[in-house]
Image (cartoon, helix red, strand yellow):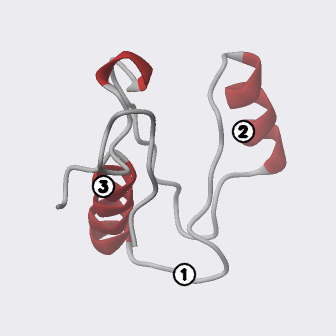
Amino acid sequence: MRKQMGAQSSSTPPASSRPFSINLFIGPEGGFTPEEVELARRYGIIPVTLGPRILRAETAGLVAAAAILYELGDLE
């Protein structure tokens, strides 16, 4: 079921609220250190996680890109 957003009939965010660009950083095996995460935050990076699952570097990028495309409504 889709949410109604104003006059739009889909859950796709309006173009004005979509990010201009997205940078995706895939961590090393074992993840980023707390110090690396804090440094990233100081530079305005918003850390996110794919949850408790551990993925190979080859897979993590694909899964993260698919999640981003889904959230932006580009996988309809």
Q: Secondary structure at mark 3?
A: helix
**Label 1 crowd bin: few (<14), some (14–19), many (20+), radius 10 Å:** few
Q: Disc 2 vs disc 1: which is toward the camera?
A: 1
Location of mark 3 (residue) = 65
Instruction: Quote the CA–CA distance across marks 3 and 2.
Output: 22 Å
- Quadrant placement of the N terminus: bottom left
Q: Residue at x 44, y 49 (%)?
A: 4
Residue 74 in percent (x, y) is at 20, 50
Q: Nearer the viewer, residue 19 or 10?
A: 10
Location of mark 2 (residue) = 36
Please name the amino acid that badge 2 sits on: Glu
- Asked if the residues shown at circle 3 and circle 1 are in contact, with their CB atoms under 8 angstroms apart, the answer is no
Decide which of tag 3 and tag 1 comes sooner along the chain.
1
Location of mark 1 (residue) = 54
Please name the amino acid that badge 3 sits on: Ala
Decide which of tag 3 and tag 2 comes sooner along the chain.
2
User: Residue 29 is drawn in which quadrant?
Assistant: bottom right
Left or right: 56 as drawn, with respect to 34: left
Please name the amino acid that badge 1 sits on: Ile
User: Residue 59 is drawn in which quadrant?
Assistant: bottom left
Residue 7 in percent (x, y) is at 35, 33
Q: Residue furthest front?
A: 7
**Label 3 crowd bin: few (<14), some (14–19), many (20+), radius 10 Å:** few
**Label 2 crowd bin: few (<14), some (14–19), many (20+), radius 10 Å:** few
What is the number of the mark on residue 43? none
Decide which of tag 2 and tag 1 comes sooner along the chain.
2
